Image: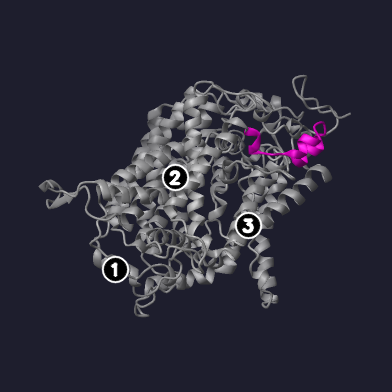
């Protein structure tokens, strides 16, 4: 993972003059940190300012609204922290110019002294705190609070109800619980210099690039044309992105997936399975819609080429070797009775499985109805994706143990024995630490409220009190090792499938209990890792710890509340939202992520892993994937030791390769094809041959593209969609690959209403 950081950090702000001038015994023990993070601090810079609170809260609310709004759409773009980092800079400078500088006396209750709406120039520390607010608004990169999807599947898929109060408690407690785990682990994974969190260095570089002074030269180096300022470039790119999205977002939605193979072979099922970008393998498919590029994998412009190359290898191997062989060659799991690419669940005859028909009044599985309808079936791609997720979990453990265990152990031991590095010394010297009881109080309070939720409102969440405590114990056990792995290798093991599997074996037949266990166990741990990473960013940027804590806490509460309010609004105002079979062909409200989350609740919770991956199900052989995943890195490690001169062997990262297609579904082939193409273009060719341009504008362009489509998407909804001002022509009727979802097995008849032919 060091290579990833090296590749990225050759970009803006990577080499900082004077950063290594501190004494060797005080310097950071990590070379990348010494190259990137300045070993200086100005504790006089104001951070607790009106500007910070105004822009921070505004960005948090706006990000929460936009990300929840877009999460229901077919291409659910996530507006990330980078967008606010770039957009808030000119706004901060604007407020510094226009706000009055008059000073006021603060009340004695607030400590006395003086304060001002405008204490001076907009500084980097204010900017960092605004971005922390924004990070809460995008759920630390996840888009919206994970627990909101529980509300979505209850209301939109199971067609049941959950009160707003119970939903708010569920979202808030699962978010805040992570603070407790983070507070317990701070001194182990934030303060030590050996716990360096490689991912934060990208943010440090971006902040330095945005705050460095513009060159005084009116022309570029070498006498070229005048260079555009970053602010002007951002505004121009934002305007172009904003205006263009009206075309694929309203006038010509077919541009979201240009699947020309389907147009040529309009009556061939096999050709459309091969060529469909959204329902097939995506051969030749491409997009002219930025939301399709960045919706599931985030912006390709900020992904290092090393990571992009690994994902390319994994995607090609899975999509164009394994899936075709399993579908057409082996007919694995009766693959040809079902679509080649689908996240839906099916009966053996190829028709859709009516999940609500096997749910009783107690929101549990109705065994008589289940026995009558038979086992649940999945598309082969969906089933193989689960197999790869099993393998990736085991491969991550083995890979880290073989390739990184000595490094992790050495750095953890050194972090406890060595004296603090320069950054920890500066933080301890200049700022008062956030009291431990703040974190412990939140931990106790969130667990107590969660216990009340699981007892008083148990009918709505299904999770028993002991299940909650088990989830908390699981989070407590895994938070420290996962944090250490992330802090030293930049790899975060995904344990969500493990948590679903465990509680599915213990509590089968209870779908909501399963997903609640997952958010209290796995997601609270994931939140803790995100909080710790933000604390490390604040550590590097010399942000007062108390300010970091309060901004994170307030941002999390605000973001979760806005997420839930938007969810209730959209779920109650859009007819048939998330029901793609009942929606018009050009409707964007198909909720692909919620569909997969719903399927997971059925597989792991309602039906249970024994009836899917056990002796009572069809997919028991996939459990061997755990063994394959565990053995894979051992083979690579053995080859590396046998042939130490072959450096390419060391670069094989099986967890990344096996997890490359983890987003499929809901992500589709056109999402991956376009993401990979643009990622390689910018982070290989532009980075190599136009490095100065890349350093100056790459992150700016990414932020502008995200922001432009987000603002136009909301504008289109409020001005046209809500008023039912729709247009209808060939370019609004989807990608024109209806046959891509057809089965190809002989004798499968989906009924008179289906467009699929019956193969004789």
Identity of the residue furthest to the top in this view: 752
Which residue corresponds to mark 3? 680
Q: CA distance from mark 3 to mark 2?
A: 27 Å
Please check the rendered image and state whether residue 265 is part of the magenta-colored stretch, yes or no.
yes
Q: CA distance from mark 2 to mark 1?
A: 30 Å
Quadrant holding the C terminus: top right
Q: Position of residue 596 (x, y in %)?
A: 60, 37
The reply to whether residue 162 is in sight is yes
Which residue corresponds to mark 2? 139
Taking the spot 43% from the left edge, 47% from the top edge, the residue there is 472
Tag 2: Cα neighbours inside 10 Å, few (<14), some, or many (≥20)?
many
Do the numbered discs 3 and 1 sit on residues whose CB atoms are within 8 Å? no
Do the numbered discs 3 and 2 sit on residues whose CB atoms are within 8 Å? no
Secondary element type, mark 3: helix
Which residue corresponds to mark 1? 426
Tell which circle, 3 or 2, labels the residue nearer the N-terminal end.
Answer: 2
Secondary element type, mark 1: helix
Do the numbered discs 2 and 1 sit on residues whose CB atoms are within 8 Å? no
Tell which circle, 2 or 1, labels the residue nearer the N-terminal end.
Answer: 2
Number of numbered labels in the structure image: 3
């Amino acid at each position: 993972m060091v290579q990833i950081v090296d590749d990225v950090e050759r970009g803006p702000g990577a080499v900082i003059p004077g950063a290594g001038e501190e004494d060797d015994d005080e310097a950071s023990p990590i070379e990348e940190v010494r190259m990137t993070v300045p070993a200086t601090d100005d504790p006089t810079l104001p951070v607790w300012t009106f500007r910070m609170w105004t822009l921070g809260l505004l960005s948090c609310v706006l990000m929460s609204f936009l990300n929840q709004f877009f999460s229901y759409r077919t291409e659910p773009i996530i507006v990330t922290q980078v967008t606010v980092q770039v957009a808030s800079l000119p706004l901060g400078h604007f407020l510094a110019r226009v706000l009055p500088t008059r000073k006021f006396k603060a009340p004695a209750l607030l400590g006395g002294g003086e304060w001002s709406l405008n204490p001076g120039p907009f500084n980097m520390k204010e900017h960092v705190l605004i971005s922390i607010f924004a990070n809460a608004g995008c759920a630390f990169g996840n888009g919206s609070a994970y627990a909101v999807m529980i509300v979505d599947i209850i209301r939109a898929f199971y067609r049941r109800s959950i009160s707003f109060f119970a939903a708010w408690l569920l979202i808030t407690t699962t978010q805040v619980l992570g603070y407790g785990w983070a507070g317990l682990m701070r001194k182990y994974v934030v303060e030590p210099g050996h716990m360096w969190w490689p991912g934060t260095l990208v943010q440090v570089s971006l902040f330095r690039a945005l705050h460095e002074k513009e060159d005084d030269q009116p022309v570029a180096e070498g006498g070229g044309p005048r260079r555009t300022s970053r602010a002007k470039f951002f505004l121009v790119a934002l305007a172009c992105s904003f205006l263009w999205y009206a075309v694929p977002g309203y006038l010509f939605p077919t541009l979201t997936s240009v699947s020309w193979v389907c147009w040529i072979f309009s009556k061939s099922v096999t050709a459309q399975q091969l060529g469909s970008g959204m329902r097939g393998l995506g051969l030749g498919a491409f997009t002219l819609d930025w939301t399709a590029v960045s919706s599931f994998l985030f912006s390709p412009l900020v992904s290092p080429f090393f990571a992009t190359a690994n994902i390319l290898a994994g995607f090609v191997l899975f999509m164009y070797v394994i899936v075709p062989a399993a579908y057409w060659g082996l007919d694995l799991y009766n693959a040809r009775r079902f679509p080649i690419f689908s996240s839906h669940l099916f009966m053996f005859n190829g028709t859709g499985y009516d999940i609500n028909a096997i749910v009783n009044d107690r929101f549990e599985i109705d065994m008589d109805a289940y026995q009558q309808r038979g086992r649940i079936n999945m598309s082969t791609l969906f089933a193989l994706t689960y197999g790869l997720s099993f393998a990736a979990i085991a491969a991550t453990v083995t890979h880290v143990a073989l390739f990184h265990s000595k490094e992790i152990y050495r750095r953890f031991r050194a972090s406890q024995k060595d004296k603090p590095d320069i950054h920890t010394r500066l933080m301890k010297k200049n700022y008062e630490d956030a009291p431990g009881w703040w974190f412990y109080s939140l931990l106790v309070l969130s667990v107590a409220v969660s216990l009340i939720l699981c007892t008083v409102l148990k009918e709505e969440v299904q999770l028993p009190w002991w299940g909650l405590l088990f989830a908390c114990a699981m989070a407590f056990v895994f938070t420290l090792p996962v944090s250490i792995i992330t802090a030293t290798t930049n790899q975060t093991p995904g344990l969500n499938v493990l948590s679903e599997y465990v509680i599915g074996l213990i509590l089968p037949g209870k779908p909501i209990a399963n997903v609640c266990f997952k958010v209290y166990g796995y997601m609270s741990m994931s939140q803790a890792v995100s909080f710790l990473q933000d604390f490390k960013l604040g550590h590097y940027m010399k942000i007062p710890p108390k300010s970091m804590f309060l901004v994170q806490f307030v941002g999390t509460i605000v973001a979760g509340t806005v997420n839930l309010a938007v969810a209730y609004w959209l779920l109650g105002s859009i007819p048939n939202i998330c029901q793609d079979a009942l929606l018009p062909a050009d409707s964007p409200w198909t909720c692909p992520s919620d569909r997969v989350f719903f399927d997971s609740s059925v597989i792991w919770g309602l039906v249970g892993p024994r009836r899917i991956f056990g002796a009572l199900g069809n997919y028991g052989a996939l459990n061997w994937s755990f063994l394959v995943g565990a053995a894979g890195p051992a083979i690579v490690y053995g080859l590396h030791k046998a042939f130490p001169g072959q450096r390419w062997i060391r670069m094989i990262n099986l967890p990344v390769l096996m997890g490359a297609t983890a987003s499929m579904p809901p992500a589709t082939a056109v999402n991956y094809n376009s993401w990979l193409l643009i990622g390689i273009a910018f982070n290989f060719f532009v980075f190599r041959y136009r490095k100065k341009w890349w350093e100056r504008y790459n992150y700016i362009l990414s932020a502008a593209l995200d922001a432009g489509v987000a603002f136009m998407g909301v504008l289109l909804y409020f001005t046209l969609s809500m008023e039912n001002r729709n247009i209808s022509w060939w370019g609004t009727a989807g990608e024109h690959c209806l046959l891509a979802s057809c089965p190809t097995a002989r004798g499968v008849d989906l009924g008179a209403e289906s467009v699929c032919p019956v193969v004789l």
